[in-house]
Image (tube, rainbow, N blue to C red):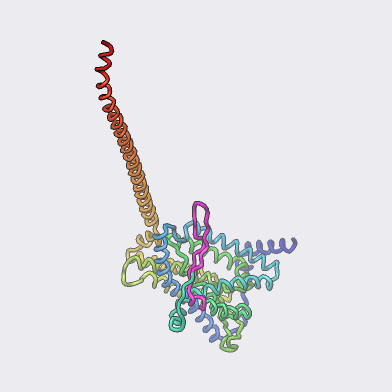
Amino acid sequence: MEEIKQLVKETIANLTQGLNATETTPRPPATPEGMAVAYGSLVLMAVFPVFYGALRSVNFHKSEKKKEKDSGVAAEKLSSSDAVMFPFLASGALLVLYFVFKIFSKENLNRIITAYFYGLGVLALTHLLSPFMSKILTKFMEKVTYRLQFTKSTRKTSVNSIDYSFTSHDVVSLILCALLGLWYLFKKHWIANNLFGIAFAINGVEMLLLNKMVIGCILLGGLFVYDIFWVFFTDVMVTVAKSFEAPIKLVFPQDLLENGISASNFAMLGLGDIVVPGIFIAFLLRFDKSLNRKSSTYFYASFIAYVLGLGATIFVMHMFKHAQPALLYLVPACLGIPMFVALIKGDIGAMFKYEDLPKKIEKKEKKSKNTSDNKNKAESNSNKNANKAESNSNKNANKAESNSKANNQSNAGAKKKQPQNASTSPKENKKKK
């Protein structure tokens, strides 16, 4: 209990004392050439997932839109409430990790974290590698498709809880990525860390849909404040980043020229500084596609802004020898430059009206479903009425036939009785006389 109280006191002191009380990040001396190689490599490793992930997001958006139309179920996308809550949830998770690393053994915790991220990293790498491996393996082995399906059934309904298809080429890719992941699992080498980190970043930029410009502004604005607070006014983020041995950051050694791949003096960049601006840049690329123009003006404007923001971050970090919140420089650049270009070109209104997956599609689908349901109901009712009419007509016909038969039989009996009465009547008359 005393240790926990002491940690709380230290945290409160860091919150109140501000920048002067923040721990700096001492770095061993590195040559100017080594720092240039490290920072240049970090920039390249950051811009590649943003650019490639944005291109992949266009096809992913089309597939999600098609699924939404076919199934009628809305695709997963970030809402305004998600964007508002995200900085608070991230802050809570950051504080939990901070106290956990302060109280418990880092080695034991990092073993669990490493095993968890090993599984995620293998799947992320497989998702990226499978299309390329499929092209290569087509010449050597047949492509066989498998389907993994779990169905939840009741007396009334049957729902597919899991429905996943994969091929034999995907299995080969999974095995190769699992073997590559063992390098990270046992050696924690910085190259394996970066491979997993880049895979996470590309998948994040590809699959996270903002849907609206306003949601992007809310998300970037909230994380702008989040990043500044936790880096400048506390040691929480820096401590967690150093203690957390997982591919949540890209690293590159500044002493690579001296020590080779066994170098250990690392410069780092968090994946959040790649994914968060990246999903906004990908949104602007999809907006460019919706305008049906030959150029992707807003995508390239935001991409250039991202590169400039990264350059500003690295410059300030090098000059002041202190960890910098990258979003402090990235958010104004990525938001300001595209919006300024949109104001000049007169597209600012269209930019804020654009939606990746508009609700109109959902309404149309509901209307079409309702009309189809109504048609089906009308057809079923008409069939029921027709069947009833046929049954009633058959009943009436049967009754009419039975009645006609009964009438015919009674008439025939009456005719037979009439001659007998006529023959007996004279004799009866004679007897009476």
Q: From this viewpoint, is residue 376 visible?
A: yes
- Could one spot residue 198 in this view of the protein? no
Magenta segment, prevailing SS (helix, strand or loop): strand
Residue 22 in the image, given as x and y percentages of width and height: 62, 69
Q: Give the residue at x 49% y 71%.
A: 146
Can you give x and y, in whole percent of width and height, for residue 275 in the image? 49, 69
The residue lying toward the viewer, choosing from 264 and 184, is 184
Residue 66 x %, y %: 39, 63
Residue 245 on image: x %, y %: 62, 74
Rendered position, 359 above or below 323? above
The magenta region covers 147-172
**Residue 148 among those drawn in magenta:** yes
Residue 17 lies in the magenta-colored region: no
Closer to us: 408 or 59? 408
Q: Quadrant of the C terminus?
A: top left
Labels in figure, total: 0
Q: Nearer the viewer, residue 381 or 58?
A: 381
